Image: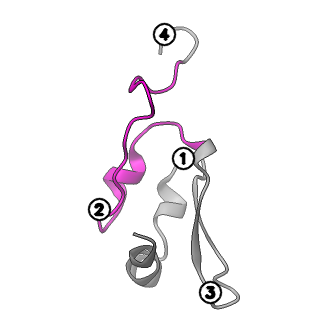
């Protein structure tokens, strides 16, 4: 996956994962130095699955965290 993120997502689509992910979990670093690399901030995941459904190459395989229930929000949301 990391190579596709650079050769397709960054080069062709200007890194959509850095824009469509609501909590800023994906970021391209090192592009200014000529060595772009994907950095994933998993701690920012809000379990929305946007990363999987919006990826142009469908190379992200989102899997629910342990327990499969997703986040627990106050008030039962």
Is tag 3's residue or tag 2's residue first in the polypeptide sequence? 3
Q: Position of residue 57 (x, y in %)?
A: 30, 68
Frontmost of labels 2 and 4 is: 2
Q: Is 69 covered by the magenta stretch?
A: yes
Which labelled disc corresponds to residue 9? none
Quarter of the figure with residue 26? bottom right
Q: Position of residue 3 (x, y in %)?
A: 43, 78
Most extreme residue toward the front, as rendered?
A: 66
Is tag 1's residue or tag 4's residue first in the polypeptide sequence? 1
Is tag 3's residue or tag 1's residue first in the polypeptide sequence? 1
- Graded by Cα atoms within 10 Å as few (under 14), some (14 to 19) or many (20 or more), the crowding at tag 2 reads few
Q: Quadrant of the N terminus?
A: bottom left
**Residue behind mark 3:** 35
Q: Main secondary structure of the magenta part?
A: loop
Which labelled disc corresponds to residue 76? 4
* Position of 31 relative to 2 (above/below): below
Q: Position of residue 8 (x, y in %)?
A: 38, 80
| Marks 2 and 4 close (CB-CB < 8 Å) | no
Q: SS of the residue at dot 4?
A: loop
**Residue behind mark 2:** 58
- The residues bearing labels 1 and 4 have C-alpha atoms spaced at a distance of 21 Å
Q: Could you say which is closer to the camera, residue 62 or residue 67? A: 67
Q: Is 52 covered by the magenta stretch?
A: yes
Q: Position of residue 54 (x, y in %)?
A: 35, 56
Which labelled disc corresponds to residue 22? 1
Magenta-highlighted residues:
44-72
5 with respect to 59 (left or right)? right
Quarter of the figure with residue 40? bottom right
């Amino acid at each position: 996956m990391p190579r596709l993120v650079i050769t397709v997502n960054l080069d062709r689509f200007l890194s959509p994962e850095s824009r469509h992910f609501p909590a800023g979990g994906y970021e391209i670093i090192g592009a200014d130095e000529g060595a772009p690399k994907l950095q994933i901030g998993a701690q920012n995941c809000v379990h929305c699955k946007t990363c999987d459904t919006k990826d142009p190459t469908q190379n992200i395989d989102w899997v629910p965290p342990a327990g499969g229930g997703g986040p627990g929000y106050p008030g039962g949301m």
